[in-house]
Amino acid sequence: MLGLKKKEKEDIFLDLFNESFEKVIVVGETFLDLVHNYEKVEDKVSNLKVLETDCDMQVHKILKKLNESVITPFDREDIYNIARDMDDIVDCIEEVANRFIVFDVKNMKPEAIIMSDLLMQSIRELGVLFNHLHEIKQNTIVKEQIIEVNRIENEGDIVYRRALTKLFKNEKDPIEIIKWKQLYELLEESIDACENVANIVEGLVMKHA
C-alpha cells in the first residue's frame, strides 16, 4: 500500500506536466491560426493573453505541488526547470503576438509563417515526449522526440538567417527592418525555448539511464 501511494504521488507531476503541455499546445495552435489567418488580430491576441494567463496558473500549480511534496519522480530542480521553460514557450509566443499589434503589422511575411510552422512542429513533438515521459526507462520514444526537437531548432536557425538576409537585402524602409528583425528574433527565441525543455528532459534521460 505504501508503495502504491508513493507511485501515485510521483505520477501527480507527470499528470501535471501533461496537463500543462496540453495548454501549451492550445496556445501554439491559436498562434498558428493567427499567423496563417491574419485577421481579427486584436481579438486573437487578446485570446492568447487569456491562454497565457491560464498557463501561468498551471505553472503555479506545479510549483505549489512541488513545495508540498517530499516524494518526486525527478530531481526537484529539474521539475522546476521544466515548469519554468514550459512557461517560457508560452511567454515568447504571446510576446510575438503582442508585437504584431504594437508594430502595427499589416501583412504576414512568408518566413514568419514558416518559422511559426516549425514552432508548432516542435511543440507537438514535445507533446509526444511528455505523453511518454513515464516510460523514460522503458523505450526510446523520449530520446527520439528530443532528437527531433533539436533537428527542428536547427532548421529554424537556417530559416531565421535566411529571413534576416532577405530582409536586409530587399527591404528599403528602415522602420520595417527594425520591426521584422525583432519579430524574427522573437520567433527564433520561441523555437529555442522548445529546445530548452527538450534539453532538460535529455538530462533526465541521462540520469535515469
Image: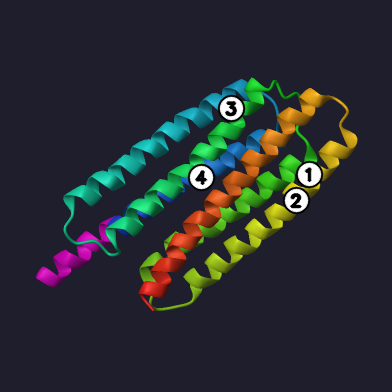
Q: Amino acid at mark 4?
A: Ile
Q: Residue at x 88, y 39 (%)?
A: 169
Instruction: State yes or no: discs 2 and 1 in contact (Cβ < 8 Å).
Output: yes
Q: Residues within 10 Å of mark 2 (few under 14, many from 20)?
A: some
Q: What's the CA distance linking mark 2 and mark 4?
A: 19 Å
Q: Amino acid at mark 3?
A: Asn
Judged left or right of residue 24, residue 65 is: left
Q: Which residue is mark 1?
A: 163
Please give the range of residues in magenta: 1-12
Q: Would you say residue 1 is visible in this rendering? A: no
Q: What's the CA distance linking mark 1 and mark 4?
A: 21 Å
Judged left or right of residue 196, residue 111 is: right
Q: Position of residue 83 (x, y in %)?
A: 38, 49
Q: Residue at x 67, y 35 (%)?
A: 183
- Mark 2 and mark 4 lie on one chain; the one further toward the N terminus is 4
Q: Which residue is mark 3?
A: 98
Question: Residue 89's mark?
Answer: 4
Question: Residue 159's mark?
Answer: 2
Q: What's the CA distance linking mark 3 and mark 2?
A: 22 Å
Q: Please check the rendered image and state whether residue 196 is part of the magenta-colored stretch, yes or no.
A: no
Question: Residue 118's mark?
Answer: none
- Front residue of 118/23: it is 118
Q: What's the CA distance linking mark 3 and mark 1?
A: 20 Å
Q: Residue at x 57, y 27 (%)?
A: 45
Q: Amino acid at mark 2?
A: Val
Q: Would you say residue 128 is visible in this rendering? A: yes
Quadrant location, the C terminus: bottom left
Question: Nearer the viewer's eye, disc 1 or disc 4?
Answer: 1
